[in-house]
Amino acid sequence: MNGYRDLRVALLGCGSVGAQVARIILEHGDELAARIGAKLTLSGIAVRDLDAPRDAPLPRELFTTDAEQLVLGADIVVELMGGVEPARSLILRALEGGADVVTANKALIAAHGPELADAAEQVGAQLSYEAAVAGAIPIIRPLRESLAGDHITRVLGIVNGSTNYILDRMDRFGDSAEDAMRVASELGYLEADPTLDVEGYDAAQKATILASIAFHTEVPVDAVYREGITKVTAEQIEAAKHAGYVIKLLAIAERLTASDGTDGVSARVYPALIRREHPLAAVHGGKNAVFVEADAAGELMFYGAGAGGSETASAVLGDLVSAARRHVVGGPGIPGSAHAALPILPVGEVSTSYQVMLEVRDQPGVLATIAGILSEHGVSAANVEQSVSTRGDDVAAGAPPEEPETATLVIGTHTAREADLAATVEALRESDAVTAVVSVIRLEGNS
Amino acid sequence: MNGYRDLRVALLGCGSVGAQVARIILEHGDELAARIGAKLTLSGIAVRDLDAPRDAPLPRELFTTDAEQLVLGADIVVELMGGVEPARSLILRALEGGADVVTANKALIAAHGPELADAAEQVGAQLSYEAAVAGAIPIIRPLRESLAGDHITRVLGIVNGSTNYILDRMDRFGDSAEDAMRVASELGYLEADPTLDVEGYDAAQKATILASIAFHTEVPVDAVYREGITKVTAEQIEAAKHAGYVIKLLAIAERLTASDGTDGVSARVYPALIRREHPLAAVHGGKNAVFVEADAAGELMFYGAGAGGSETASAVLGDLVSAARRHVVGGPGIPGSAHAALPILPVGEVSTSYQVMLEVRDQPGVLATIAGILSEHGVSAANVEQSVSTRGDDVAAGAPPEEPETATLVIGTHTAREADLAATVEALRESDAVTAVVSVIRLEGNS
């Protein structure tokens, strides 16, 4: 297609993430090719069981059980098997053959990251693992590249969605630890054996990776101090709330000077209090966030989904496109930003909703008139409220009402075309029932 | 030094950002060289006035008024002059000469981004401008690279710190619009002519850049629909608060299908309501944040400082290191993450603070005993509180007190060494005054 060269991509593993990655490569091939300047060809998917059910419909002929053979012919290897072996050996073989490697395997990177990074560097190949920490959230690349000229002093991460879900339920709904665990388990937030999550082992692996990258140093996972959430009680959560705090399980990586003057780093995982005004306190449910403090940049936070098949696939694909780009241009850039040439639509085409504050005549039939104006323009009201106005307060305080015959209405609309909403407001302004359109404001951020 | 090759960096402009960039290149040269694999040599700083005061002490011999000459001999040009000309011509000249270019110039990128990107692509040079949007926050690179394999559907940005400061004051302190403007002006958040900020022109430039990158298409700044914050009233803010919303000035870039079926994009800036639970609602003061929605990644947010000399310098340096790395390895990678080899310090060396919940004998002298134990270990209390315990509730409800002689104390400590705090808790546990150490939890996230 379009004279693009082919880049052969070997996929190892086809669980929920692998199936999404394969699906996107197959379904969005043209769009990816335009972005990369080369075509990604899925040369095969290595699996243990050819007949296992998959999360996406994929051509059967892509599957193979011979991962070693598949790796040999690949330009880029995407490892999504999990676990240390055979993932480690296959990645080493791929790197030795000069292939770039993308992996989401946090256990492997936490245990063997430096060995694999060295192997990549020796042959000038690229090893990337954005998906290994905090799922969809771009954090590895910002730490390694965007902050490469800065001096990171501390990283505080909510990097385990299951435990954040449990602690958040206890904080927001007053659940006991047992109840919150049970709900998390029912919703699939916890593995059959929840130890990896609730005892902080998963977070400790991520702390290792974050500390290694933030401080350009090797941090063995054994060196991470670790406490889980199993001792956190509803009483503690309540006392924290009372004092203006929330309890979060944090993975912390910090530059530190020891009492004897030694310059070093600390990596640790434990439940800790966070002020309610801190951006990390607003990380609810199963979401993840990584808060970074750097000398020049100050405070940064990266927030998003920490897990999930398609979310993790997004991070894997970002790494994959980046590796592929390197084959094309020898650099990280994405081609000129203007290749899509999409039309810019006028604001009238936007779908949004309005909150309109009106001053209306306080007499029978006014609401019906206003409702009629909305429906004429295909706009429906989500809610209508008589607002507490300053004038009302004056009345309550005994002052004589200045214009007793008006009332203030706040109408929230359902989503509609901006052009229809604007026409509705114009019609309201001209209606005899309305004495003034006090304010109009859009509502954004809903899905 | 260490046989590294030199990369000549030409700096154009020496305002607050430029002075910080120059300072860091000069002061942290060895650390940057280790990260890059090449030494950054500041070949000169082009300024209009050789004798103007600078934000950092810099060697006088670096300064020149001949920007064109400086650009000619550079491997990487860092443009921090601002404005369209002569910045545009100098950047084009640099790119034509094969130099990589880093710029923080949002006005220039908003107006001429596609032209400059094309010029860079023709010669295989790199043009980067992370600092042009949202200051220190890595957003350009995540959008271009991390999300390169995903499909972005919407970007909602709080990208102007001045207007966010004003709206936040009105929301949190009940300021009138005039009072909030005055305070913002006094604190230096507003320019002498605040029009660029409060009328949304600055945010519109950033909307252009975000939309172009998110959707791989050209979005002229004239095509951005724009409303500023000058019509936002205290009454609106109050009504929004009452209804569970907060008003933010948003720069919005969105994939959209028009009513006639045309696939296109919308870029717009206006004040809008956001639910208080939305992550953007927690962006206070002069901070910036960019909320991104993508098909696979779901919801992401990038948060941090949107302006400031050292903050912006961090983003510029990230781009500079990335460009320099490309000269060394032909790729974006940072060398193996383990070059610093820092010691991993035990958790006892960490400085933190504790909140300790104790059950104590309710008798005279107990507080003095506990205070004595803290001070013996060099730990001081920040606050001590008698907590409302369930047992206390039982008493209030008329149930007979089970252990009337105990009380519950919550002690918050000042920051101390973890080892000292742990020893303090051990001593409290062994004290006769304490019947039980109910819970111990650390407090994190303070500066």
Image (cartoon, coloured by chain):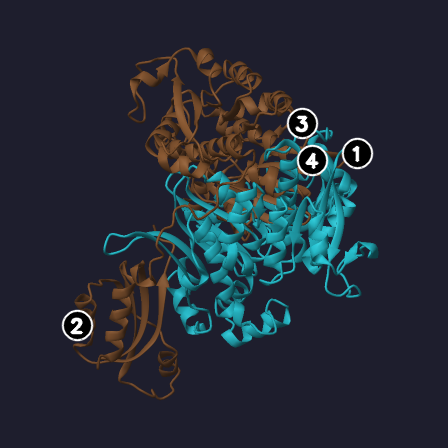
Chain colours: A cyan, B brown
Residue designated by label 2: B368
**Disc 1: which chain?**
B
Discs 2/3, front: 3
Mark 1 or mark 2: name the one nearer the start of the chain.
Answer: 1
Separation (CA) of disc 3 from disc 1: 16 Å
Q: Which of disc 1 and disc 3 is earlier in sequence?
A: 3
Give how far apart the Cα atoms at labels 1 and 2 are: 76 Å
Q: Chain of mark 3?
A: B
Query: In the figure, is residue B61 to the left or right of B232?
Result: left
Q: Nearer the viewer, mark 3 or mark 1?
A: 3
Q: What's the CA distance linking mark 3 and mark 4?
A: 15 Å
Identified at 41% across, 54% down, the residue is A253
> Is disc 2 placed on a helix, strand or loop?
helix
Callouts 4 and 1 in the same chain:
no
State the mark number for residue B262.
1
CB-based contact (under 8 Å), mark 3 and mark 1:
no
**In this figure, what is the number of numbered marks?**
4
Callouts 4 and 1 close, C-beta under 8 Å: no
Query: Does residue B79 lie above or below A270 as drawn?
Result: above
Say if labels 2 and 4 share a chain. no
Dot 3 amino acid type: Glu
Q: Nearer the viewer, mark 3 or mark 4?
A: 4
Q: Chain of mark 4?
A: A
SS of the residue under disc 4: helix
**Element carrying mark 3:** loop
Provide the residue designation for mark 4: A35
Q: Residue at x 20, y 66 (%)?
A: B377
Q: Which residue is mark 3?
A: B218
Q: Amino acid at mark 2?
A: Ala
